[in-house]
Image (cartoon, rainbow, N blue to C red):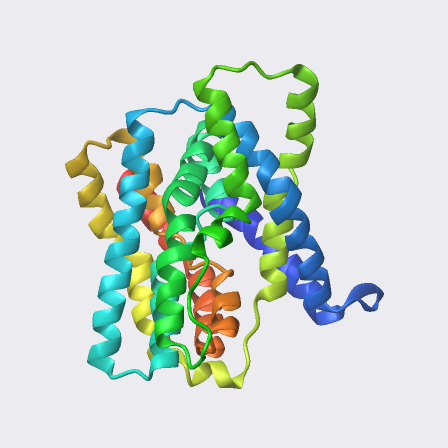
Amino acid sequence: MFEVLVQMTGLIVCGIAWRVFKPAGLEPAQTRKVLTSLVYYLLLPALVLSVLWKAELGNTTLLIALSAAFAVAVGMGLSILSCRACKSSPPVAGAVILAATFPNATYLGLPVLEAAFGPWARGVAIQYDLFACTPLLFTLGILVASRYGNTAEMARNMAGELLRIPALLAAVLAVLLNIMEVPSHAVLDGLLGLLERGVVPLMLFSLGLSLEWNRAHWQTLPSVIPVVLLRLFIVPAIILVFASVIGLTGEWKAAVVLETALPRMGLGIVFCDRYNLDVSIYAAAVTITTVLILLTLPMWYQILV
């Protein structure tokens, strides 16, 4: 586990270095947008189609989705209580709630779970995200962002938002092909295999491009502490118990808990911008939780395995 985290850190550091030195004069934001768009619209849907088409879908799939949904509910509920106790302003509270609720389940979950348990665990990361976290992010997450943001824009046409997510559409297609037992073709398997191999390195590199720290972030530390505690410690501990109660065992349970213990997702920055939440707090949460998983993920792995 630690060796894999070091390798992942190496790719993230490459992204940070690109941000600092700007090779070929390319701006980090421009480079990140190109890379993330490539992954979002092409490479990730190919990976989802490849994995879910051949995955074993059944009772375990339902339990994974249920665990993910419960983790979202717990993270959101506890973060709302924390913000009320701290009397946070609405923009700060909205950013904290989003940061504490939704993990980076796919882009970090894929390399972590595959390294920890093998290729089969990629299906856990994808099912955890696309069957629960992503639909909840684009429904419940939008409602929270619009509720706490200083904006006249309200959440609307959430079904339309979901239908524009390429990976989710690929998941629906893959599940249909899986259920109908439609055989794949060697040429298509080869093409999907070529595409899917680019997801993890490009997203880790892009994560490095997005990480930054400035003086303003020091002032946000008190607000980020609840995010760190909930995202990396409290919610995973609760899901460890919940997964046992609903019948997940062995490596399936371990994979779900590791998914829950991942840092928050970068997509939330888009929500903060769109709904006028506190971007600096969310960005600080991204940086801090991503760095801390070098310590917390090996700890959870030792507990679970």
Q: Looking at the image, which residue is at 23% across and 44% down?
A: 240
Q: Looking at the image, which residue is at 38% across and 56% down?
A: 139
Work out whether residue 54 can be spotted: no
Q: Nearer the viewer, residue 279 or 209?
A: 279
Above-or-below relation of 3 to 160: above
Residue 130's x, y, as percent?
A: 44, 42
- On screen, residue 125 versus residue 222, left or right, reads right
Residue 101's x, y, as percent?
A: 34, 60
Above-or-below relation of 157 to 111: below
Residue 71's x, y, as percent?
A: 28, 51
The total number of labels drawn is 0
Q: Nearer the viewer, residue 139 or 240?
A: 139
- On screen, residue 252 versus residue 195, left or right, reads left
- On screen, residue 118 versus residue 49, left or right, reads left
Q: Nearer the viewer, residue 1 or 38?
A: 38
Work out whether residue 185 can be spotted: yes
Above-or-below relation of 63 to 73: above
Q: Residue furthest left?
A: 245
The C terminus: image quadrant? top left
Q: Looking at the image, which residue is at 53% across and 50% down?
A: 6
